[in-house]
């Protein structure tokens, strides 16, 4: 059965490769948006060289890494599951001899790998060329960075699944999708770097699951968090992953009771 899930992930990866021009357009969008934000940051730091321990170089690296992993964690327009619920095709997935959530998880993980390679790497490389951003130089930073982002991507999948599965109970679930994405992008640091937020707001956000989506991986990449603080944040990230996954599995069981297949 494990091989089946790998095959599902591989199929999703190959499916994304077909959309080369769509990926190129998305890549250009990521780079364009990062450029706009970068020059705003440069203008702001001309007034004050250091803010919350971040200089202009740190904040530029933060911004470009955020754009690099955005589609890995919070891809725009993910309504695939919602659409199958609206059309009734979800019955086919529920009838398959596999776990419903793991099936969709495998599909999304395959797409995540694609976005990491064909959107994430080129985006950050563009930032390196334009602004000489650089990369971590210590093996400890690379080791931590190799560990934290996969958990962030897994959190993102659970979150996407949650705001899609509400279509079982809400007719127009697209509004929920838009609201969930907007909230997540703000609280992950995609709009404003979390270290630049007011202290009281950072305290609240640090206890929410959203920090583990992208902010924590990016801060690890920058070397801004390490030691006991890193492991504490990682433990919180894993804790929220367990909570969201359990919530997803429970909602799947509840949703099954609302599905009626014609003919039995």
Image (spheres, rainbow, N blue to C red):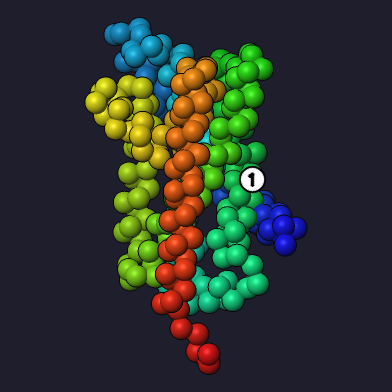
Above or below 190: residue 19: below
Above or below 149: residue 1: below
Identified at 37% across, 43% down, the residue is 184
Disc tally is 1
**Dot 1: what SS?**
helix
Q: Does residue 163 appear left or right of residue 147 in this picture? A: left
Identified at 47% across, 54% down, the residue is 246
**In front here: 168 or 83?**
168
Q: Residues within 10 Å of mark 1 (few under 14, many from 20)?
A: many
Please state, as top left, top right, bottom left or bottom right, where the N terminus lies in the image: bottom right
Identified at 64% across, 24% down, the residue is 143
Residue 40's spot in the image, x, y percent? Answer: 35, 22
Identified at 35% across, 9% down, the residue is 50
Residue 82's spot in the image, x, y percent? Answer: 44, 65
Residue 197's spot in the image, x, y percent? Answer: 29, 25
Would you name the residue on which mark 1 appears?
A: 114
Furthest-right residue in this view: 3
Q: Is residue 21 visible?
A: no
Quadrant in which residue 5 is drawn? bottom right
Quadrant in which residue 86 is drawn? bottom left
Residue 25's spot in the image, x, y percent? Answer: 54, 44
Quadrant in which residue 129 is drawn? top right
Q: Is residue 148 visible?
A: yes
């Amino acid at each position: 059965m494990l091989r089946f899930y790998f095959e599902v992930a591989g199929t999703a990866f190959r499916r994304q490769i077909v959309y080369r021009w769509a990926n190129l357009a998305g890549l250009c969008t990521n780079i364009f948006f990062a450029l706009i934000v970068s020059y705003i940051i440069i203008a702001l730091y001309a007034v004050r060289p250091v803010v919350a321990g971040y200089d202009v170089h740190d904040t530029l690296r933060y911004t470009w890494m955020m754009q690099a992993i955005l589609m890995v964690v919070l891809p725009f327009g993910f309504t695939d599951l919602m659409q199958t619920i609206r059309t009734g095709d979800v019955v086919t997935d529920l009838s398959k001899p596999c776990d419903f959530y793991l099936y969709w998880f495998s599909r999304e993980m395959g797409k995540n790998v694609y976005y990491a390679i064909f959107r994430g790497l080129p985006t950050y490389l563009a930032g390196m060329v334009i602004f000489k951003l650089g990369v971590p130089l210590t093996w400890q930073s690379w080791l931590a960075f190799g560990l934290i982002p996969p958990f962030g991507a897994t959190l993102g999948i659970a979150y996407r699944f949650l705001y899609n599965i509400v279509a079982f109970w809400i007719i127009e679930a697209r509004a929920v999708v838009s609201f969930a994405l907007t909230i997540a992008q703000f609280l992950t640091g995609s709009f404003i770097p979390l270290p630049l937020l007011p202290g009281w707001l950072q305290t609240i956000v640090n206890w929410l699951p959203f920090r583990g989506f992208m902010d924590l991986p990016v801060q690890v990449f920058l070397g801004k968090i390490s030691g006991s603080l890193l492991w504490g944040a990682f433990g919180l990230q894993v804790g929220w992953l367990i909570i969201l996954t359990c919530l997803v599995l429970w909602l799947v069981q509840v949703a099954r009771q609302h599905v009626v297949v014609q003919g039995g």
